[in-house]
Every structure is written in structure tokens, then in C-alpha cells.
Image: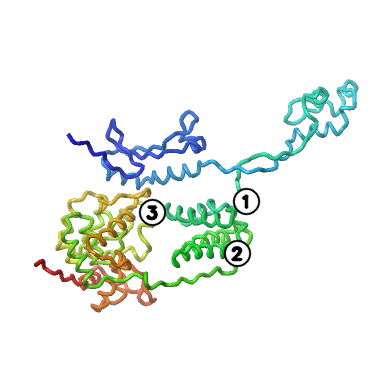
Amino acid sequence: MGAVMKEKLPKFFQRVAATGMLRVCMKVPPTCRSNLPDEYKVDGKGRGYLIQHLGTSDLREAERIERQGNYIGIFARLIDAAKPKPMKWAYVSPTAWEIERLKIVLDGLLSVDPKTLSGTPPMDRVIPGVGMTALQLFNELKSGAVTPIVEGRYQQVPDEGEQTPRFEVAVDLWATEKKVPEPSRRSYKARMRDFADLIGHDIANRVTWDDLVAFKDALVKAGKASKTVKNQLGYVKTIIQWLVDNGKIDTNPLEKPVKYKVIVDHRKTRKDFDEADRAAIYACALAEARPLYRWANLLMLFSGMRDHEFAEADARDIRQIDGVWCLVIDREHRLLDNETIKNDESVRKVPLHKAVLDAGFLEYVRDLPPGPLFPQLDPDRDGRRRADASRKLGVWLRENAGITDRRKVNHSHRHSVETLMCAAGIRERTAFAVTGHTPQSSGDKYIHPTVKMLKRAVEKIPVPKVKEAV
């Protein structure tokens, strides 16, 4: 008999052997366990694993429950918050009782016979925090049991930072206020760590304009792409500006602008697909038996939608509206935060092209239960399928469709579709409503294309002519 294939589950998912039920399980580093909140401890001790039972054996349902509860995100935040705080050397002042002891010594009590002082101030005074009278303490000093010297000392204490937030705390404050999703929160923290590594500290109140310029120069010197330099500098400037706007730091390092001009390298600029490219993609997609590669490519070819828009769609997002079959890009069935939809203009109804319907797309959808439109995609740690879609479809474009020009990527469909609709006489506002781009003029913002108007625009996208095999 052949070996039994081990079930491949998403990261942090486990199936309980005894019951077959699914759960989320995340290991807690030993150094973090004692710092977990009490409700995550057993008998006062931190757990080695954080576990959430999902109450189902069905993987799709388990993923839906996890997305709704965001258990992976919650566990990650708990572990991050429980990481041991860094230690620093600090001067610790004398305690109150040490100061009292010094006062007695300075009163010259050691040079006096205690019998003559019994019952007279200050010998009957109880020393705060010590629980003994001055006379008892005097005897301790006389016998040499304690030293009369009082002084501060240096010792290691938890590094709580200064009153101004440290970079990581600042990102959390900003992200919580702005309702920034977890992946973006991590990205901002990563950029702020890069910034801290360069300037040698993570204290927001000590950041200067020169530090920001030095960070920009270091990115340029490291050979980062022009757009990368602008984006990474933008991450840091966003956090610093938020601290300034909210009075978290005393000075404004951005009072003088830190400018960077993006230099476009036309050798790497994205290009649209030409007629031959579209024909190759169309032919290869129709020949595909694998649902992801067949339908994802046809959707992009005849709508120009972004890969994450269909990768994170639900089967219930395929709906008939005013007699037109559409893929509805909205937040109704997207249980994660709003990063899955780029902006308000991206919330839209995208009519399905006749070529997509004729290829049998609705039959594919009808066989799906409520859940991901493309369950073939693996979710990442945050439950998103966008990264897996981008990777798999990018490889397919090169190896199956034979598109080797690196300037032509799946995003090129958006360039092609808008160009083709423009060539067919479709008004720019209507074309933008199909692809989810923001209107360019104030007048266009008053136009709200109907589903039937969008359907007419989509049908103007020509079906590529495929050469028949000889």
C-alpha cells in the first residue's frame, strides 16, 4: 500500500487526531509565557501554546470562523506584547527607610549612651517601612548588623522608554487610531526598525531632520529602486507626522520638507499586453482544466480587475443585478479588514463578459459552497489569498502563456482593458468604473454609471482571435 498523504493545512491550523476537528494553534516562545495575560495562563504559569478550537472539521468553514474571529491576529499580538522588555542600567535612589537611617546617624546617636535616651525623642519614633523604633535601630547600628552608609546605586531595570513613544509603540498608536490592518501594521514596524538601525535609537523625541535625510540617502546608496525609496521614506514620515500632529513629540523634524523625486526607469515601466499576448493568454486559459488558471486569467482578460479582487472574493459575490451577471467587489463577504479592497472606488459591480460566461464560469460557481471563489489558493498568516494568487498566476504567465517580457505582468491587463475600451469609444468615467480607478475631474464624480452601462462597456473589450491548430 502507498504511503498516506499528510493533509496540508494553512499555517497555524491543526486537526485534532482524536476528533478530526480543526483548531488554531500558535506556539508561545518560552521567554513570553510568564508575561501572558492571566486568562491565558494555567495555574499561574504561561501556556506553551495558544489554542482556539473552531468547532468544525470542514476546512472552509474553519477558515471562515477564524477570519471572523481573527484568532491568528489576536494570538500574534498577545505574543508580541508578551516579549520581555529590554533592560537598561539606571540610578536607583535611596529608599525612604535608608534615608531615615541616615538621619539617625547624622543626629549623632552612635556617640550617645542609649540608656540615657530611652523614651525621649527621637528614640521612640517608629522608622517608616522598618517596623522598629529608633532605639532598636540604634542597637542594630551599634552592633554592626547594618551599615550606616546610605547612597544610591546603579542596577538594571526594565527599559520602559521615555515619555515620548518608542517607534513600535508609536506605530501601534497610529494604527489603532487609523484602523490599519495587521499586515500594514507589521510593514510600518519593519520600516521603523530599519530607521532605528540607521540612527542608532528608537526614541521619537530625538529624531531630527538630518536623521530623515540620512535615511533617504542610505536607501539610495543601498541601490533601492526609486519607488521603494519613496515608499519606505513615506512610512517613516507618516509616523513622525502623526506624532507631531498629536503632540507626542516636542519638535517637528518635518518642519522643513524631506523631498525625494521618483526617477522613472522606462526600461522597467509596465507595458500593456498587445494583441498577440492577449491571444496567447486567452488560448492557454481556455485549454486549462485547473479552475484557478482558467477563470482567473479570463476574468483579468475581460475586466482588468486586480488579482486580489477575485482572489479574496466569495462565491456569493457572483450575483445577477438588473439581469446582468456581475462579480460584486464589496465588503459584505470579506470578513477581514478593509485592506482587501484598495479604496472606495474599488467597491463596484464588474459585469462578466460574454466570453467568460460562454466558457462556463457560472457552472463553476454553482458547484462551490459559500466561501472562497478560488479555494485553490492558500491563505497567508492573515487569511489573505492575494499573495498566493500573484505568485501562481505570475509563474503561469511566463511558463504557460509564454509572456517573457518582464515589463508585462498580470497587472498589465488593467492597462490593456482601459486602452481597448477607450479605443472603442467608451467614456473615461465608465471605463474607470469598470476597473475601479478614481475619476479625474470633478464633473466625472457626478456620473454614476449603471450596471447596464458597465455591461455595454465590458462587451466592447474584444475577444482575441486564436489561431486554430494546423
Q: Position of residue 80 (x, y in %)?
A: 48, 44
Name the residue at 33% across, 68% down: 407
Mark 3 or mark 2, which is nearer to you? 2
Q: Residues within 10 Å of mark 1 (few under 14, many from 20)?
A: few
Q: Dot 1 lies on which element?
A: loop
**Quarter of the view holding residue 461:** bottom left
430 to 385, vertically: above or below: below
Q: Residues within 10 Å of mark 3 (few under 14, many from 20)?
A: some
Q: Position of residue 416 (x, y in %)?
A: 27, 71
Q: Position of residue 152 (x, y in %)?
A: 74, 39
C-alpha distance separating marks 3 and 2: 36 Å
Name the residue at 78% across, 35% down: 150
- Mark number, residue 189: none
149 to 422, vertically: above or below: above
> Residue flagged by tag 2: what amino acid is it?
Asp
Q: Is residue 322 visible?
A: no
Tell which circle, 3 or 2, labels the residue nearer the N-terminal end.
2
Q: Is residue 58 left or right of residue 49?
A: left
- Quadrant location, the C terminus: bottom left
Q: Residues within 10 Å of mark 2 (few under 14, many from 20)?
A: few
Q: Is residue 307 visible?
A: yes
> Residue flagged by tag 1: what amino acid is it?
Gln
Q: Dot 2 lies on which element?
A: helix
| Residue of label 2 | 210
**Quarter of the view holding residue 304:** bottom left
| Residue of label 3 | 337
C-alpha distance separating marks 1 and 3: 31 Å
Tell which circle, 2 or 1, labels the residue nearer the N-terminal end.
1
> Residue flagged by tag 3: what amino acid is it?
Asp
Q: Is residue 428 left or right of residue 46?
A: left
| Residue of label 1 | 163
Instruction: Check the image and name the residue furthest to the top.
Output: 115
